Amino acid sequence: MIKKTLIGLIVCMLLTMLCAACAVENAGATTGPTVHMGATDFLQHSVTIHKGDKLTLIDDASSEHIITNGNWINGAAHPAKESGAPTANQQSNGNDSATIGPFNTAGIFHLYCTIHQNMNLTVTVQ
């Protein structure tokens, strides 16, 4: 009787550890649209997403970025609050990610890095 109980407990513990390991492996998975960032620029300068989506910015470099609403125009930063755009104020310290949104309004919105001149991203929401 004690052997069966002990074996049952060991099997339950192994199953629990297996399930927990699977959950941890999937916890960092990114779903939805993504845009990657390099050391001083977005790796793509525009992205089209669906209304209601969140946008994940992935920093592939060890560079710091501060992403906010607005854009660079002729070398000058122009912070802006665009009607219908979610407020962005994301700091990346390198090799990490941040999510902005949801984007609940269709339109064209602009994000930029306050640190890196001319690092602009245009988000088109359909």
Image (cartoon, helix red, strand yellow):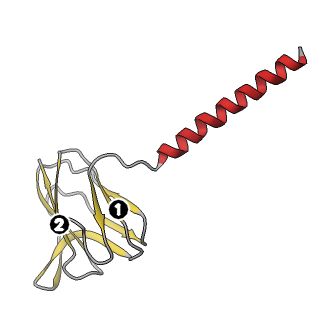
Q: Residue at x 65, y 32 (%)?
A: 16
Point out residue 108 in the picture as x, y percentages from the top left corner.
10, 58
How many numbered discs, if any? 2
7 vs 12, left or right, is right
The residue singled out by tag 1 in the image is: 58
Instruction: Residue 66: give its label.
Output: none
SS category of the residue bearing label 2? loop
In whole angstroms, how far apart are the C-alphas of marks 1 and 2? Answer: 14 Å
Please state the horizontal and vertical placement of residue 26, each as a whole percent of the image: 47, 43
Q: Amino acid at mark 2?
A: His
Residue 99 rendering spot, x and y as whole percentages:
34, 56
Q: Residues within 10 Å of mark 1 (few under 14, many from 20)?
A: many
Q: Quadrant of residue 24?
A: top right
Name the disc covering residue 45, or none. Answer: 2
Q: What x and y, as percent, mark residue 69? A: 22, 68
5 in relation to 122, above or below:
above
Q: Residue at x 39, y 69 (%)?
A: 92
Give the residue type at disc 1: Ile
Which is more N-terminal, label 2 or label 1?
2
Which quadrant holds the N terminus?
A: top right
Q: Badge 2: how crowded within 10 Å, few (<14), some, or many (20+)? A: some
Q: Secondary structure at mark 1?
A: strand
Residue at the spot 38% in from the left edge and 72% down from the top edge: 61
